[in-house]
Image: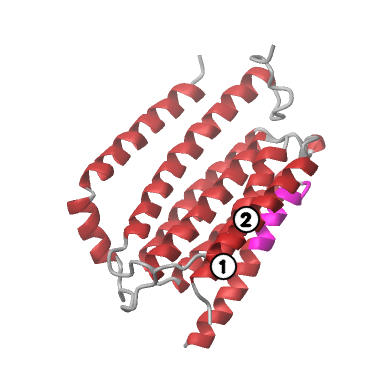
Amino acid sequence: MVGLEHYLILSGLLFCIGMVGALAKRNIVTILMSIEIMFNAVNIAMVAFSRYVTPTLLTGQIFAIFIITVAAAEVALGLAIIMAIYRARETVDVGKIDLMKW
Amino acid sequence: MELGASIAFWILAATSVMSALAVILLRDVFRAALFLVLTFLAVAGLFVTLRADFLAAVQVLIYAGAIAILIIFAIMLTRNVQSGNPSNRLLGAVSFLSAILLAAIVYVALNTHWPQAKEAPLEATTGPLADFIFNKYVLPFELASVLLLAAIVGAIVLVKEK
């Protein structure tokens, strides 16, 4: 019998995997993909709460829809920034994007 | 019915975790992006097991469709084959910190008394969701549309040739 705890632990596991990728990778596109995994983990937790705690109010699902909207805006802007950086510096390695590092 | 839902949950959970690990462990960024699509699809399946039919469709359309295509475009346009997908020198410390965070999450999830509702979940969520978004949550909805417009304009300005 699968319950709320199963979904919360799965969500935490995905969030931690995404966090390792976001903090420990050098490729900027991989960092963006890891952030998307973290968004998905949060959405799983939201929808699980919506299913088990407020099944008729759907609050968690509405929250998840807004998270997806913000994630879409974030990925469009992030990839535009990546393209601009790549055009200027010919690299996607965050270790080499150090113009503002003193 | 219950047994089928449990089996579906375990298969989808294993798929999503394995493919998320593949995203951060594979050397080839393009293959990592394909595993990212698999993660998105597994999460859409998890939404189905949670009776969120509209969100599952949105997940497939927006994540597995639009966002995955955008990411694959970016990889194709910035591909640097020989550099691969390396980690920086923080990998050990970050893995350790994430393990601690995961242990804390598991502890909290198992030891909190969650207030669980007794009533059955809605059969179809699309109509009620529309009701909520266009009545009770109409201001956040309008703000989200403005945010999307600003993001699109910003993205166009950023990638435009000078």
Residue A82: percent from the left, percent from the top?
59, 29
Foreground: B111 or A92?
Answer: B111
Q: Is B42 drawn above or below residue B37 in the view shown?
A: below
Residue assigned mark 2: B104
Residue B13: percent from the left, percent from the top?
60, 68
The residue lying at 36 percent from left, 37 percent from top is B148
Label tally: 2
Q: Is residue B88 left or right of residue B57?
A: right
Query: In the image, what residue type sits under mark 2?
Result: Ala
Secondary structure found at label 2: helix
Residue A50, which numbered label? none
Query: In the image, what residue type sits under mark 1?
Result: Leu
Q: Residues within 10 Å of mark 2 (few under 14, many from 20)?
A: few
The residue lying at 27 percent from left, 45 percent from top is B141
Q: Is residue B10 in view from this perspective?
A: yes
Furthest-top residue in view?
A: A102
Q: Is residue B56 in view from this perspective?
A: no
Foreground: A51 or B83?
Answer: A51
Q: Residues within 10 Å of mark 1 (few under 14, many from 20)?
A: some
Where does the magenta region start and end?
B17-27
Q: Is residue A22 left or right of residue B51?
A: right
Same-chain status of marks 2 and 1: yes
Residue A39: percent from the left, percent from the top?
51, 49
The residue lying at 53 percent from left, 77 percent from top is A2
CA–CA distance between discs 2 and 1?
Answer: 10 Å
Foreground: B103 or B111?
Answer: B111
The residue lying at 33 percent from left, 75 percent from top is B121
Q: Is A58 drawn above or below residue B118 in the view shown?
A: above
Tell me which numbered mark, 2 or 1, is placed earlier along the sequence.
Answer: 2
Subunit bearing disc 1: B
Residue assigned mark 1: B110
Residue B3: percent from the left, percent from the top?
53, 87
